[in-house]
Amino acid sequence: MKTLGNIIWFLFGGLIMGLLFFVVGALWCLTIIGIPFGLQLFKIGVLCLWPFGSQIEINFSAHPLANILWIIFFGIELSFGCLVLCALFCITIVGIPFGLQWFKLAQLALLPFGAELR
């Protein structure tokens, strides 16, 4: 199921979404101040490409100041968008596995600094 889910995810939006996160992350990396934020966008982009089978370990205490800044400027909006899509997918029985992946993306979008993808 993991491979089939990743293929469906990749074909129906994962590629576009991952590429968008990579492009925005590259733009953030053009400035010295934006490099840490750009690297976190790369991390989210990797999860956007192949979310099935991957796990996230959130560690807020690793970089609390960076996480607070992220939440203020980016995290709430990104996480809310992912949660809305999670709710829309979880309404249907067929969409529940995809909704759970959106919930995983919402967690990473809220607190990416110190988070590890496995």
Image (spheres, rainbow, N blue to C red):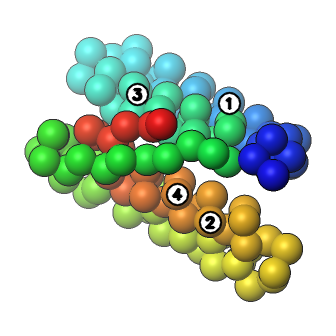
Single out the mark in the foreground, 4 or 1: 4
- The type of residue carrying mark 1 is Leu
First in sequence, mark 3 or 2: give its number. Answer: 3
Q: Earlier in the sequence, mark 4 or mark 1?
A: 1
Q: Residue at x 26, y 57 (%)?
A: 72
> On the rendered structure, is 37 left or right of 104?
left
Label 2 vs label 4: CA separation?
6 Å
**3D distance between C-alphas at marks 3 and 4:** 20 Å
- Asked if residue 72 can be seen in this view, the reply is yes
First reached walking from the N terminus: tag 3 or tag 1: 1
Q: Residue at x 76, y 35 (%)?
A: 15
Question: Which three-letter amino acid code belongs to the residue tagged 3?
Answer: Gly
Is residue 95 depicted above or below 110 in this figure? below
Q: Are marks 2 and 4 in contact (CB under 8 Å)?
A: yes
Mark 3 secondary-structure assignment: helix
Q: Nearer the viewer, residue 97 or 74?
A: 97
Res. 38 mark: 3
Note whether 118 is above or below 67 in the view shown: above
The percent coordinates of residue 81 (x first, y second) are: 55, 65
**Residue with the mark numbered 4:** 104
> Which class describes the residues within 10 Å of circle 3: few (<14), some (14-19), or many (20+)?
many
* Mark identifier at residue 100: 2
Up-down: is 25 above or below 75?
above
- The residues tagged by marks 3 and 2 sit, at their Cα atoms, a distance apart of 25 Å
User: Residue 11 in the image: x percent, y percent?
Assistant: 87, 41
Residue type, numbered disc 4: Lys
Q: Which residue is mark 1?
A: 19
Q: Are marks 3 and 4 in contact (CB under 8 Å)?
A: no
- Classify mark 4: helix, strand or loop: helix
